[in-house]
Image (cartoon, grey):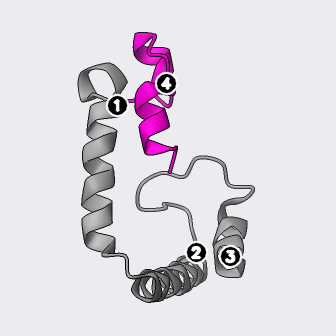
Amino acid sequence: VGEVGELSEIFQWKGEVPRGLPGWEDEEKQHLGEELSDVLLYLVRLSDICGVDLGKAALRKMELNAIKYPVKLCKGSSKKQTQFNGDSGDTADKDQGH
């Protein structure tokens, strides 16, 4: 959790950042890479300890998201699934928001 906090600090006051991080100094990008790596290593270790196949879980989550957020309705939007089709949230309940 601490490592995620350190990663979050990097973006805390930057707002939306453009692809490739134009305008960022090399030192900032290197620091970002270090913090991302810390989070990745902890995540991989945690998934191993918990017996979670991280690759399989990620693919399943992408499949669930494709159902909840169809590209034709959702591309380019940050609205919740229930705001697109008036759904009662049943799909979100099944996924429990995780």
Q: Quadrant of residue 23?
A: bottom right
- Give the residue number, with chain letter if any, for mark 2: 25
x 33%, y 73%: residue: 54
- Front position in the image: 75 or 22: 75
| Residues at marks 3 and 2, CA–CA distance in whole angstroms | 26 Å
Q: Is residue 34 magenta?
A: no
| Residues at marks 4 and 1, CA–CA distance in whole angstroms | 12 Å
- Give the residue number, with chain letter if any, for mark 4: 89
- Give the residue number, with chain letter if any, for mark 1: 69
- Front position in the image: 36 or 64: 64
- Give the residue number, with chain letter if any, for mark 3: 1
**Does label 4 or label 2 sit earlier along the sequence?**
2
Mark 3, Cα crowd under 10 Å, few <14 / some 14-19 / many 20+, is few
| Residues at marks 4 and 3, CA–CA distance in whole angstroms | 29 Å
Mark 2, Cα crowd under 10 Å, few <14 / some 14-19 / many 20+, is few
Q: For the residues labelled 4 and 3, say whether their Cβ atoms are less than 8 Å apart.
A: no
**Does label 3 or label 2 sit earlier along the sequence?**
3
* Mark in front: 2 vs 1: 1
